[in-house]
Image (cartoon, grey):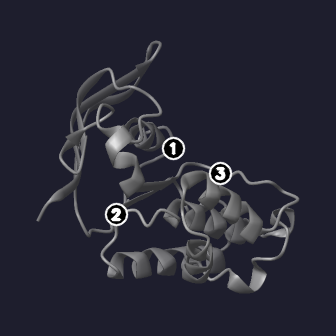
Amino acid sequence: MTTAISVSGLVKTFGATRALDGLDLTVSTGEVHGFLGPNGSGKTTTIRVLLGLVRADGGDVRLFDRPVPDALPELIADVGALVETPLFFPGFTGRLNLRLLAEGAGVPRARVEEVLELVDLTDRADDRFKGYSLGMKQRLGIAAALLKAPRLLILDEPSNGLDPAGIRDVRELIRRLGDDGRTTV
């Protein structure tokens, strides 16, 4: 089985704070991998390093056996991510927000409808984002991360702040994505 994520000896400091101290992590392709830990344990920092949003101080980071951050320009089309709270235009509908993102990424407009269906938002796609529940906002964020049909989906706390029904819905969505063979962290 090939490796989607390979992290070895990852180190990241912020001033005097060592956020990551020799982290090793391997995620095989096609796997749904839960990355768990208490607040402040470095989960979001690790995700930010994987996505090239912050630079590691040490260690080796690879996506699909290619070095990060050097290979990210070639790899980024294969990676979809939701990091922390999704941001959209509040006065625009969910559908329009996704269409704008799709247009900017060169993704066909038909893909917007596909991802709305995937995250069960088709019936509410023409409602304004500002009227969405927290769970709907998270699902729209996941839809945005899926626009490019990525091989690797990285979701940072996708059920954060959701009620039990919303948590169940997001977990079921992640299971469905994993059943389709998409690597999900």
The amino acid at mark 3 is: Thr
Q: Quadrant of residue 150?
A: bottom left
The amino acid at mark 2 is: Arg
Q: Is residue 30 left or right of residue 173?
A: left
Q: Is residue 61 left or right of residue 35?
A: left
State the residue position of label 3. Answer: 85
Category of crowding for the residue at label 2, using alpha-carbon neighbours closer than 10 angstroms: few (below 14), some (14–19), many (at least 20): some
Mark 1 or mark 2: which is in front? Answer: 2
Marked residue nearer the N-terminal end (3 or 2): 3
User: Residue lying farthest top?
Assistant: 16
Taking 87 as reference, is 50 above or below it? Answer: above
Percent position of residue 182, x then y? 34, 70
State the residue position of label 1. Answer: 39
Disc 1/disc 2 C-alpha distance (Å): 28 Å
Viewer-proximal residue among 13 and 180: 180
Viewer-proximal residue among 115 and 183: 115
Category of crowding for the residue at label 1, using alpha-carbon neighbours closer than 10 angstroms: few (below 14), some (14–19), many (at least 20): few
Residue under the image location 65 percent in, 51 percent down: 85
Residue under the image location 14 percent in, 60 percent down: 2
State the residue position of label 2. Answer: 151
Badge 1 marks a residue whose secondary structure is loop
Percent position of residue 124, x then y? 77, 80
User: Residue lying farthest bottom?
Assistant: 123
